Image: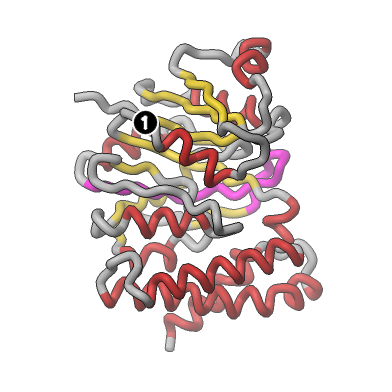
Amino acid sequence: MTKTVAVITPAYRAQDTLPATVESVLNQTHGDWQHWIIADDGFDYEGFLAQRNLSDPRQVFVTSGGIGLGASATRNVALAQLETPYAAILDADDRLKPKKLEMAVAALADYGIVTTALDVMTTEFAHLRHVGDGPDRVLTPGEHKWVSVSMDSMIVWDRRRGTGRYDPSMSNMTDLEFLLQLYRTIPESYHLGTPLHDYIKRDGSMSNGKDVATGMIRSKREILRRLESGYYGLKDEDVTGVAGFLRVSLDAEAAYAAALAAKPGLLFEDHLEPMLAAAQAK
């Protein structure tokens, strides 16, 4: 049976970062993949990569159909066309560790969703910290965010068991919102505690500037509203778990500006984790 993974990468003005992203896919030990590169800026990424000797017949180049439609709409273009059993998300400035797809596909034999620990890095690929590292484990929807406290665009999933679409109406947190859609039909995920995904922290995501913070707060409140209205159809204990994380995260957003002023360069994850630990200790 085929074990092809479609890796979905939306590209908007990604000329500076995409080569490293593409190279990380080319270096996968699991070679049964398609790399969907969806241009959201009208740029010829196929020709661009060929000029840099990074082209491969497993790459698929399509367009979002517009300019600047956003990552959610752009990812959905690929999701509407896929025929592979598995799919993964990879932003145009992030990278996969060489064994990520191999280890994820092995876990997908038993689980419908696989998440991995993150290697959080600067734009120069200098290590900042790990997120979600530790033992491999099965997680319920209510447990997931208490382990993986950062972004969720590192997922690999079985499309035959769960499906969804990214919500273009949300400015932030679309990766978590999409994951919650998958949890509707997949009751648990498998978390690989080895950091297998390089998450590049850009200036906006590192500092949570005013516009970023406003969008984060609005999006977290909307996901919380959907959760508590039964929108995702999760068990009560899972709603409680995700909602509890979001409430602590909203408190962290409110306090982050002052914490950052006191400690310039403070990562939001480093700010959030003690608050989560305190909430769990109650």
The reply to whether residue 42 is in sight is: yes
Using the rendered view, name the quadrant where residue 125 is placed.
Answer: top right
Query: Is the C terminus in the top left, top right, bottom left or bottom right quadrant?
Result: bottom left
At a point 60% along the width and 54% down the height, the residue shown is 129
The reply to whether residue 136 is in sight is: no
Q: What amino acid is found at the position of numbered circle 1 in the picture?
A: Leu
In the image, 164: left or right of 50? left
Front-lying residue, 7 or 139: 7
Tell me residue 72's x, y (percent).
Answer: 53, 46
In the image, 80: left or right of 258? left
At a point 39% along the width and 55% down the height, the residue shown is 179
Residue extending farthest to the bottom is 282
In the image, 172: left or right of 263? left
Q: Give the class, few, some or many, for how many residues have Cα within 10 Å of label 1's Cα (few <14, many ≥20).
A: some
Tell me residue 12's x, y (percent).
Answer: 66, 35
The residue that label 1 is drawn on is: 82
Tell me residue 107's x, y (percent).
Answer: 27, 42
Residue 95 covered by magenta stretch: no
Magenta range = 111-128
Q: Tag 1, which secondary structure?
A: loop
As displayed, is residue 269 above or below residue 279? above
Residue 121 covered by magenta stretch: yes
Tell me residue 207's x, y (percent).
Answer: 73, 61
As displayed, is residue 254 above or below residue 32? below
Q: Give the main secondary structure, helix, strand or loop, of the magenta stretch.
A: strand
